[in-house]
């Protein structure tokens, strides 16, 4: 098997601290490097549609839910501050991808929903996004992808 950047780091630690088992660094380091590499590739797709990753997440969340949601529900789902969410939604409203609707039950609140233009856009972006993800994972066969998904799920369940 070929070596990667993390192998070099682990070898350096083994030389400097042979008494220390640094094997956890291999896993955590590789996950960190994978995240960096994936983020670049994911952002490349979003940029093709003039979206940031946060804007993609907002549009995708609205599409998945399939009904209007409050800004609070959106920012809690996406782990953003209310101010950041408001700014992003404002930008998406100006571009015609989402609209705010007055709440029928609380006049202090509103609901955010996709416009037809927003649905059309996010459907195209999600297709490109899934294909990009499929390509990123193509170094692993279907069984390996299933194993990786199961292991990551196990770790997340224990740590979230």
Image (tube, grey):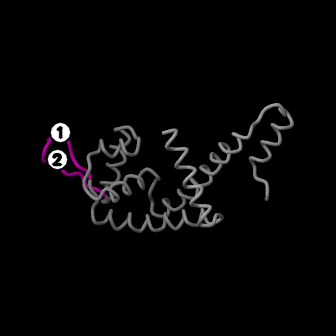
Residue 61: give x, y in percent of width and height.
36, 54
Pick the residue in front: 36 or 151.
151
Question: Alpha-carbon neighbours of circle 2 within 10 Å: few (<14), some, or many (≥20)?
Answer: some
Residue on which the image places disc 1: 108
Decide: is 15 above or below 88: above
When asked about the image quadrant of residue 87, the answer is: top left
Residue 19 % position (x, y):
82, 31
Q: Residue at x 14, y 41 (%)?
A: 107
**Residue drawn at point x = 48 percent, y = 67 percent:** 128
Q: What number is the disc on residue 7?
A: none
Residue extent of the magenta highlight: 98-112
Q: Is residue 71 magenta?
A: no
Mark 2 near mark 1, Cβ–Cβ under 8 Å?
A: yes
Q: Please say if 143 is above or below 19.
A: below
Taking the image as shown, residue 52 lies to the left or right of residue 83, namely right
Quarter of the image with the N terminus is: bottom right
């Amino acid at each position: 098997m070929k070596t990667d950047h993390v192998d070099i780091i682990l070898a350096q630690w083994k030389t400097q601290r042979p008494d220390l088992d640094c094997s956890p660094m291999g896993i955590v380091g590789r996950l960190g490097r994978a995240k960096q590499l994936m983020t670049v590739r994911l952002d490349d797709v979003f940029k093709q549609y003039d979206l940031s990753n946060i804007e993609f997440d907002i549009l995708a969340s609205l599409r998945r839910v399939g009904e209007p949601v409050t800004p609070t529900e959106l920012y809690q789902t996406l782990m953003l501050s209310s101010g950041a969410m408001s700014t992003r939604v404002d930008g998406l409203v100006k571009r015609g991808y989402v609209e705010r609707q007055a709440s029928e039950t609380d006049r202090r609140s509103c609901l955010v929903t996709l416009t037809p233009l927003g649905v059309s856009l996010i459907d195209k972006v999600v297709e490109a996004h899934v294909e990009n993800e499929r390509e990123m994972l193509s170094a692993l066969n279907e069984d390996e992808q299933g194993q990786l998904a199961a292991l990551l799920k196990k770790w997340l369940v224990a740590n979230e």
